[in-house]
Amino acid sequence: MALTIVYFAWVREHMGVADEVIDLPADVADVGALVAWLGERDGRGAVAFAEPQRIRVAIDGVMMGPDAPLAGAREVALFPPVTGG
């Protein structure tokens, strides 16, 4: 399944790209598995996703948790927690 992944803030800085289109392995079926797979894929991902519990995710513009399925998704956005002031 081809999926557009968009990275924001320090996740983007660590990954070295703003976005990419990737073909997911068949066993990557939910958000948690995606973050784990990205963290294992290479050194950049290992740094960006070293603390997966800190990563926030939106699937097609809707905030989701780690158990959210990826089936039918077109875009996944990954970013650190957002604070306001």
Image: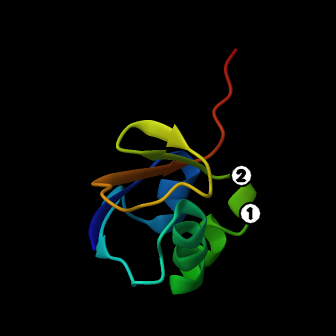
Query: Can you tell which quarter of the image residue 4 is in?
Result: bottom left
Q: Position of residue 46 (x, y in %)?
A: 63, 77
Residue tagged by mark 1?
51
Give percent across and percent down for residue 51: 74, 63
Classify 10 Å Cα crowding around label 1: few (below 14), some (14-19), many (20 and above): few
60 in relation to 13, above or below: above
Whole-percent x, y for residue 11 in the image: 54, 56
- The structure residue drawn at horizontal position 64% and vertical position 67%, both measured from the top left corner, is 49
Callout 1 amino acid: Glu
Residue corresponding to mark 2 = 54
Q: Amino acid at mark 2?
A: Arg
Going 59% across and 83% down the picture, which residue do you hit? Answer: 40
- Is residue 76 visible from the viewing direction of this image? yes
Q: Dots 2 and 1: beta carbons under 8 Å?
A: yes
Residues under labels 2 and 1: Cα distance?
6 Å
Q: Secondary structure at mark 1?
A: loop
